[in-house]
Each structure stands twice: as C-alpha cells, then as structure tokens.
Amino acid sequence: MQSKRNRYITLSPSCSLRLLETPCVYNRDEDELYEIGDNALEFLAKCDGTRMAGELGAEPEFLSYCLNEGILTSLDSPYKRHFTLRPSPGDVSLRYLELHITSRCNLRCKHCYLSAGDGVDLDLIRVFKVFDEFDKMQGLRMLLSGGEPLMHKGFWYINERIQDFGFRSVLLTNGTLINRDIASRLNVQEAQVSIDGLRVSHDLLRGDGSFNRAIKGIECLTEAGTKVSVATMVTALNRNDFDAMQDLVQALGVSEWNVDIPSLSGRFRENPGLLLPPREAAEYLAYGFGGGHHLLGAEGYACGAHLCAVGSKGQVAKCGFYLDNPVGDVSEGLENCWEKVGQIKLDTLDCDCEHVEDCRGGCRYRAEIYSSEFGPDPVRCYSHGVNPSCMKGGERHDYKEGTEKLRKCV
C-alpha cells in the first residue's frame, strides 16, 4: 500500500466547501458544518484529487484530523474534483430551502397548513434550475416537500439528479406510500415522516389506516439505511399522546423528533377546534429532541432568517406559510428572490425579554396572527414562562404554573 504522502488527497464526496458568513466545510451525509479559517480554506481548496499529500504541504496534525473526520479522503490515483467557490449572496446566507415540488397529495389532513391541493407539479426544468442555483448560493439543506413529494409525476428524475449536488436532501413525507422498493431507491440523505399522535388521533387527523402505513414506511426507510426523523404537530386530538409518543419514536430508532404548534392557515382554518390556545400548546414544546436547524435564526436576526420556500407554482416566499404572499417567482432567479425576502433583526422586535436570543422571537407567522409583524410569538413566550405583553384578542395570563414541566429534560 502507498504511504500517506504518496496518495492523492481529495475532499470527501459527501463534503463541500461553503462560503457562508464564514468559510465552512459541510458534510451533507452527517449534517455537520465545520467553520474554518482562511488558511484552512486555501488548503482544502487545493485538495481536488490531483495532488499527493506530500505536494500539499499540510500540517500532519491537521491532515490527520481531516482524514479521521471524513472531510478528506485519499486515493490511489488522481481524480479531479471541481469546486464552486463563491460567497453566499446577501447579508444573511440562504442555508435551508423548502421546495414544494407538487401540490398533489394522497391524504387530506385536517390540520394541513396549505390549502386544498390543485394537482400542480413544479416542472422539472424549474426544479433542476432551483437545485443548481441553491447549490451555487452555498445552500446546505434542500427540504423536498409537497403535497406529498412522491406524487410528483417526475419524482424519480428528481431523485436521480438530486445526488449530484453538495447540499443535503431531506424528503418531507407522510410516509404512507413508502414500501421496501421505494425506500431502497431513494437518494435522499434523510426522510422526515409526519406522525401526529398514536393510531386513533393520527388517523382522525390524517385518515383511516394512515398511522400503520406511516409506521411501516419508517421501518422500510430504516431498513434501507436512510436516516429518519419524525415531525409532530400538537393538536387538541393528540394532546394526551405525548408521553406514549416519546416511547414510540425512541423505539422506532429515529434520529430526531420535531414537535411544533400549527397555525390557523390552509385547511386548518376549516377545523379551528383542533387548535390549542398558546398557553396550553406551549407545554408540548418540552417534547422532541435534536434538529430543527431550519427554524433557527442567524445571529442578531429573528427566527427563520436562513430559510425560504418555493411553491409548486414557482412562487418564492420567506417560508411555506407565506406562499400565498410571495416576493417573486423562480423564473426571476432564486438569488434575486432571496434578496427580496428580507430578514427581521432581533432589535426591531417588540420583544426584550432575556430569552429572545434563544427563541429568536418565535415563529413570525404565528406572531402576526396573535400580535403583530414585530410582536412576540406567544407560544414561545409561554414555553419560557413569559407572559406575552401584546397579544391580539386580549389573552393575558400570568404564566407561572407548569414551568418546571417545561424545563424537564426529555
């Protein structure tokens, strides 16, 4: 075997260089982001598979670290890798893109935040254009959404192409269409499956038999080696399921459990009785574990600053809740639309409590419903034991009881 100095060094296939607010290396398979300095960037940019370790002049400790972390790999013979190195545009980088490739869905969930599906697929030319633009904009996570994305007529063409880019691909699915064959063919790094309670409450929300099919889908994905996360929306139907849900998701072996509170939008407006008051809903944010990267704001900015969404008609908005009020269309270019999205700075919010750096002001869409564009999200306020001061509708509660439960470690 060749010595390390006489082997060709290249950035690992799962890793890419990203010029965000600071230079980074992103490992899409592990969803790991490493901040690096200018010297490390200069060195790693030379690791394109055409030079041996001895030619690169790397510090032995740094080279060993990169090889052990899987950032670099060594080859017996040269194989040139091409990098796209350009700074992410704008003051805040676009890291997470929610791409609704279709409005088609096989379910009609009572709490869906989108309106009734109209059977529209985002055409493949625009899908691939978005892939390419997002990659060049230094994007990290592509969230393939719908409707049910597997129902896009060209889904398998999308599945084939998506592996050619440096971002991590995450399939957001209801899980009911996934069998062993489909699971084995998927090229995504992660699938997030919606499980909204135990069987009875899940089926009441999503349709008879949907719970068992979704669980089977998770089992098939896990068997195929795909990382699986679970998303759960808190409603009046599943509020008593969460202790058992915690046991369920742990037994399923998922890597991440995202728990959130839905807002009255889309089809959920037809079922307002399913929505819990903010004070009650907040308790359930104590559940869940891991992840939620795309919900985090950039330093100094409100929630969702690194995120935007593209709808199945090509409309671009700051997140999926705002698709009916887009800033533009992907035909204008994703970068041009991103410049128009705009981000809210934390110091412009009507929130000045000690937790604002943690909650980032909470969900901006929910805040607008309950207070104002720059007001607080009361769900996040209550989850920190804070009394929101400017809610619409006059709800004013001194929220002290239950704070110990909210702080419990799950």
Image: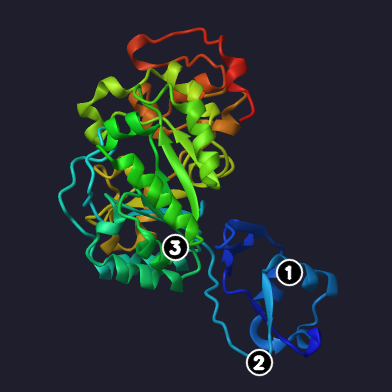
Which quarter of the figure has residue 70? bottom right
**Within 10 Å of the Cα at label 1, are there few (<14), some (14-19), or many (20+) other Cα atoms?**
some
* Dot 2: element: loop
Hey, what amino acid is under mark 3? Answer: Val
Q: Is residue 3 visible?
A: yes
Q: Secondary structure at mark 3?
A: loop
Mark 1 residue type? Cys
Q: Tell me the residue that label 2 is attached to.
A: 77
- Figure quadrant of the N terminus: bottom right
Residue 61 at x, y = what percent? 84, 70
Q: Disc 1 and disc 2: Cα gap in Å?
A: 19 Å
Give the numbered dot on residue 188.
Answer: 3
In the displayed structure image, the side of residue 289 where residue 165 appears, left or right: left
Upstream in the sequence, badge 1 or badge 2? 1
The answer for how far apart the CA atoms under marks 3 and 2 are is 29 Å
Are there few (<14), some (14-19), or many (20+) residues within 10 Å of tag 3? many
Q: Depth check: 81 or 286 in front?
A: 286
Pointer 1 residue: 66
Q: How many marks?
A: 3
Where residue 128 sits: x, y (%)? Answer: 33, 69
Camera sees residue 349: no
CA separation in Å, label 3 and label 1: 24 Å
Q: Name which of mark 3 and mark 1 comes first in the sequence.
A: 1
Vertical comparison of 313 with 197: above or below: below
Question: Residue visible at 50% across and 63% down?
Answer: 138
